[in-house]
Image (spheres, rainbow, N blue to C red):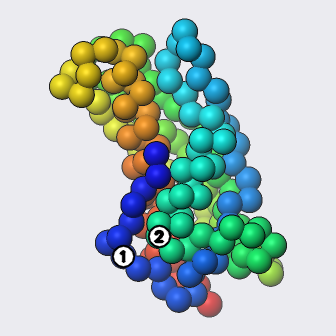
């Protein structure tokens, strides 16, 4: 689910500066029901995406900023031809020195998978879920790369 971000380079002030402190709100997928996103899978996608953007710091204590992400809601259809999933994720970036929030936003990102993606409804929901999470993370990274820092 990670996002590849080669369009923009991270400003020097953000290079290897952000660690993922806390990820909440994910749920394990029940094999008898629709696809979900576990907190572990979401954390992994966030870390990989931040690394691809050049801003990830693996060591929490060495980071300039800490990212907190809460998957508030995952709106998924029960049935349909086109399956649109919308993820709502609250992101907060905290300056580790001051403890102050330098970024806080709830990002909503829809993604639609159609019959051409798969004839199976459950597969379309999974594709739409993954697409929505990717789009959400991409929007976060775009915001972070434009963020004014000291």
Residue at image location 55% in from the left, 9% down from the top: 32
Q: Position of residue 54 (x, y in %)?
A: 51, 74
Q: Residue 53's mark?
A: 2
Distance (Cα) linking label 1 and label 2:
8 Å
List x then y, in percent, for residue 75. Answer: 48, 28
Q: Which residue: 21% across, 21% down?
A: 115
Q: Residue at x 34, y 38 (%)?
A: 111
Whether 145 is drawn above or below 111: the answer is below
Q: Nearer the viewer, residue 98 or 6?
A: 6
Residue closest to the eye, 48 or 79: 48
**Residue that sits furthest to the top in the current view:** 32
Q: Nearer the viewer, residue 1 or 109?
A: 1
84 sits left or right of 54 in the view: left
**Quadrant where the C terminus is found in the figure:** bottom right
Residue 132 pos. (x, y %)? 41, 41
Disc 2 crowd rating (10 Å Cα; few below 14, some 14-19, many 20+) is: many
Of helix, strand and loop, which one carries label 2? loop
- In contact (CB < 8 Å): disc 1 and disc 2: yes
């Amino acid at each position: 689910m990670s996002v590849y971000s080669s369009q923009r380079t991270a400003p020097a002030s953000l290079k290897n500066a952000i660690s993922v402190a806390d990820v909440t709100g994910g749920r394990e997928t029940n094999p008898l029901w629709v696809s979900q996103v576990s907190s572990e899978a979401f954390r992994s996608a966030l870390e990989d995406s931040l690394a691809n953007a050049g801003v990830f710091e693996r060591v929490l204590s060495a980071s300039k900023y800490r990212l907190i992400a809460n998957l508030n809601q995952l709106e998924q259809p029960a049935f349909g031809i086109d399956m649109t999933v919308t993820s709502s994720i609250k992101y907060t970036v905290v300056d580790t020195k001051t403890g102050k929030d330098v970024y806080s936003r709830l990002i909503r990102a829809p993604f639609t998978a159609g019959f051409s993606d798969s004839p199976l409804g459950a597969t379309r929901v999974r594709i739409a879920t993954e697409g929505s999470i990717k789009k959400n993370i991409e929007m976060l990274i775009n915001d972070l790369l434009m963020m004014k820092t000291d």
